[in-house]
Amino acid sequence: MKQLLVRKGSVIVSDVPAPMVGDRDILVRVHHSCVSIGTEVAGVKMSALPIWKRALKQPHHAKKVVQLMRDQGFKRVWDRVNGMLAAGTPTGYSAAGEVIAVGEHVSGFQVGNLVACAGAGIANHAEFIDVPVNLAVRIPAGLSTEQACTVTLGSIAMQGVRRATPTLGETFVVVGMGILGQITDQLLRAHGCRVIGTDIDAERIAIAQSCGMQFGINPSDGDVPEVVRRLTDGYGADGVIITAAASENHEIMVMAMRCCRRKGRVVIVGDVGLNLQRSELFNKELDVLISTSYGPGRYDPTYEVDGQDYPLPYVRWTENRNMEEYLKLMSDGRLTLAAMKPQVFDLEQAPAAYESLSLPGKKPMLVLLSYPRSDTAPVRTIQVAGPILSQRAGNIGVAIVGAGGFAQGMHLPNLQKLQGQYQLRTVCSRTGANALAAAKQFGVPSATTDYEEVLRDPHVDLIVVCTRHNLHGAMVLKALKAGKHVLCEKPLALLESDLDAIESFYAAPISPKPILMVGFNRRWSPAFRRLQEILKGRTAPLMARYTMNAGYIPLDHWVHGPEGGGRNVGEACHIYDLFFALTGSHCVDLQMAGVTPQGRQWARNDNLSATLTFADGSVCSLLYTAMGSKQYAKERMEVFSEGRVFVLDDYKKLEVTGSGAKGWTSATQDKGQAEEIAALARMIREGAPDGFIEEQLAVSRMTLESERRLMLREQVDD
């Protein structure tokens, strides 16, 4: 499919794999999409800046990059950032079109429905979009997709008006008479309010007045607050809604506060400077309110992604209901965009459309993109660059499934370094743009959104599963049944039924069976491998104590929810596996204890103690906590064995006391991801060591049991 991408200060129309429909989503063939003149044009300009300038403007992103460089090394992260920027990023957040497929758990939509869709990263400028149900609404009869594709802008304006709580007869000032200001004016007048609009563009004021706005003020013609006072019998406006976009202009807020009467309110919809002056706020006792995008539900993954609605009696106007009401107002003729004279460009003309918004002088107020009408089925696998290479003799063909941060930061670079053993064949991701970006950066010949296509590919020998945790079990089983070797990032499964099915596969009398490796990379780290060498041949049990200072992650993060399964299952499993590898034995007893949270920010399976007793008499304990300081090392293990003490410090150093054996040191952290990939290649060629796959399954089984005991204990305590 064709999709618009932003790259190095410009927009390009690129071929991208079309999305699959999600279980709770609808798949839409786009007819029209709306360009956000403020947000998107700013994004295009930002993409043209050198990396150091972008870092200054986006310090929160820069901080994350610096932390990644500390963990993964400067060159690896630098290459990844440059690769992402070179590939381009999707843009767009408002579209309308026809439903061509519905997810398994979707109700309320049918194939053939015309719908309007919202959401950055979802309602992209693309021929096909996969949209969660709460970010889509049906278009009323008689309303065109050309009109309905502005649904996001309308919802943003509507939420700003709702935040202002207007009442009949009040006077409001609207600052900025672009498209958001024009819609805001009409919505306020529908509430029975008088509206004073102000903008530096006289033509925009004239357009609003032609639609019925009472008063317009151009700042060049006089002092805006003074004019507002004259128009309001000297009191000032009841409220001001700022729809202007000028992130570095702090004077707009000053002017807005001066326009208000005592105890008035200012609602911020646009991106403006917020260097607030206390005197204006204090003397008038003003309320300053932020309007968050489309309304309640925005940025809540439970609402937007999982499709769980807020009950109407308790949350009357959600973002979805705002979208629906905006379309009804247009359908009823109570709100119109005709005076804005929308300019429509074909998708292939998109670069010219954006250029028209960047040129000095008169700019269009509303720009729409039109898509070709076709019944052609979505194409979900594309060739990225050059011919698809034939399989090199002896090389292992690899498909990456789930092209998120870990896959791009670890597995893809490591596989690329081992080109003599592996050959990257395809990248599969839920979003086509993400698959395409990863494929381009790492020279992978194809990109796809279709996992079934990956399973059918005879050139793929190994599937690397890096998706969200809840998908692992079923995807692994499908790959094994297709005869593919699998490297599955931990955990192997969240459900015992999935684990049962995988165990049954290996118990069946079928030979040869593909290799399964779970991404327990720490057992392959150089520091731990050195420890194993020193302990080889021990005759007595050992004791080990592992501390994981995991750091706090908010409980609404996906790792704590159904997709992640919690951090005990999702991360502590690493250490359970390490204990199995350390002892070379199997667990015969498991004791679990977790904190009893006094505050809701803590979770029992986020702060726990686990004690494992092994058949050889060894005892290993894990203290996993989110309560520590990030300034302290994340991981530390102490091992006591036959008069010796070993300290593994954050995979940078192994210290040995009580023995002449040398330890191990490194300037950078090495948790064994590269060594894991190399070990897997050996297993695929030579076969897995006896009991290896069984041990991986045993660790996974024990991990699920640890969670069951931990949460059962919580129920008993409650």
Image: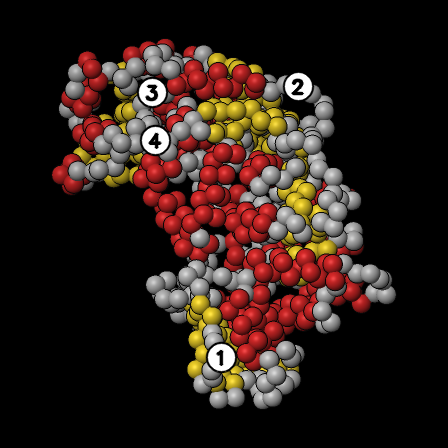
- Number of numbered discs on residues: 4
Comparing 232 with 348, the one in front is 348
Q: Residue at x 53, y 16 (%)?
A: 349
Q: Is residue 316 left or right of residue 247?
A: right
- For label 3, the residue is 177
Q: CA distance from mark 3 to mark 4?
A: 11 Å
Q: Residue at x 74, y 39 (%)?
A: 390
Q: Amino acid at mark 4?
A: Gly
Tell me the number on the disc at residue 661: 1
Q: CA distance from mark 3 to mark 2?
A: 33 Å
Q: Earlier in the sequence, mark 1 or mark 4?
A: 4
Mark 1 neighbour density, 10 Å: few (under 14) some (14–19) many (20 or more): few
Tell me the number on the disc at residue 270: 4
Comparing 712 with 237, the one in front is 712
Q: Quadrant of residue 617?
A: bottom right
Rendered view: 575 above or below 570:
below
Q: Earlier in the sequence, mark 4 or mark 2?
A: 4
Q: Residue at x 75, y 47 (%)?
A: 393
